[in-house]
Amino acid sequence: MEIRILLDHDLEEFDDYFEAGLRETGWDQDLTFIFKRLRDYGLPDDHPDQEIWRFAQQQRLWLLTNNRNSDDDASLQATIKRENTPDSLPVITVSDKNKLVLAEYRQQAVNGLVEIVISPERYGGTGRLFIP
């Protein structure tokens, strides 16, 4: 099974930790994760959150973000509230990206990520899910 993950700009440099967590938990034996950056799709790093969410939904990409808040109308959270449907893939949010350096936290994050992506029908329309 191939799983395409779009890393939000805040997580671009953390893909190695996710790949390490996949190896540490053995999920790399069963699943193929492809981590992509915004620029891989021709999107600038400062692309508006609402456009990133729309792009991820259009392309059926799992959007992986860091925990951050913004209250303006174009923020990710506002976009989810306004445009989320029962068929929308959830945004998967790492609670604390800096803890990904810790093996136990990283493995918990990866296990949470895998649980979500292998059951899209279970999580469709949930808006945002936090790992771990």
Image (cartoon, grey):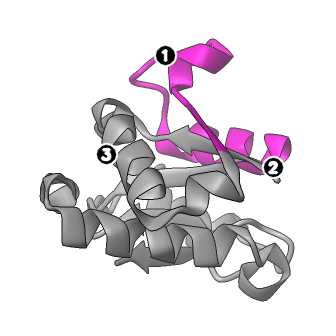
Check disc 1 and report its element: helix, strand or loop. loop
Q: Using the numbered discs, state the Cα–Cα distance from disc 2 to disc 1 in whole angstroms.
A: 19 Å
Whether residue 44 appears in magenta in the rendering, the answer is: yes
Q: Going 65% across and 83% down the picture, which residue do you hit?
A: 126
Up-down relation of residue 37 to residue 4 (above or below): above
- Graded by Cα atoms within 10 Å as few (under 14), some (14 to 19) or many (20 or more), the crowding at tag 2 reads some
Evaluate if marks 3 and 1 touch, with contact meaning CB atoms under 8 Å apart: no
| Left or right: 58 in relation to 100 | right
The circle drawn on residue 6 is none
* 94, 26: nearer the viewer: 26
The circle drawn on residue 60 is 2
Whether residue 65 appears in magenta in the rendering, the answer is: no
Q: Position of residue 25 (x, y in %)?
A: 45, 66
Query: Which residue is identified by label 3?
Result: 17
Evaluate if marks 3 and 2 touch, with contact meaning CB atoms under 8 Å apart: no
Residue type indicated by callout 1: Pro
Residue type indicated by callout 3: Tyr
Question: Residue lying farthest bottom?
Answer: 122
Q: Going 57% across and 46% down the picture, which residue do you hit?
A: 50
Q: Earlier in the sequence, mark 2 or mark 1?
A: 1
- Graded by Cα atoms within 10 Å as few (under 14), some (14 to 19) or many (20 or more), the crowding at tag 3 reads many
Q: Using the numbered discs, state the Cα–Cα distance from disc 3 to disc 2 in whole angstroms.
A: 23 Å
Q: Earlier in the sequence, mark 3 or mark 1?
A: 3
Q: Nearer the viewer, mark 3 or mark 1?
A: 3
Q: Position of residue 123 (x, y in %)?
A: 71, 82
Q: Position of residue 116 (x, y in %)?
A: 63, 75
Check disc 3 and report its element: helix, strand or loop. helix
Q: Position of residue 8 (x, y in %)?
A: 44, 40
Q: Provide the residue span drawn in magenta.
A: 33-60
Check disc 2 and report its element: helix, strand or loop. loop
Query: Which residue is identified by label 1?
Result: 44
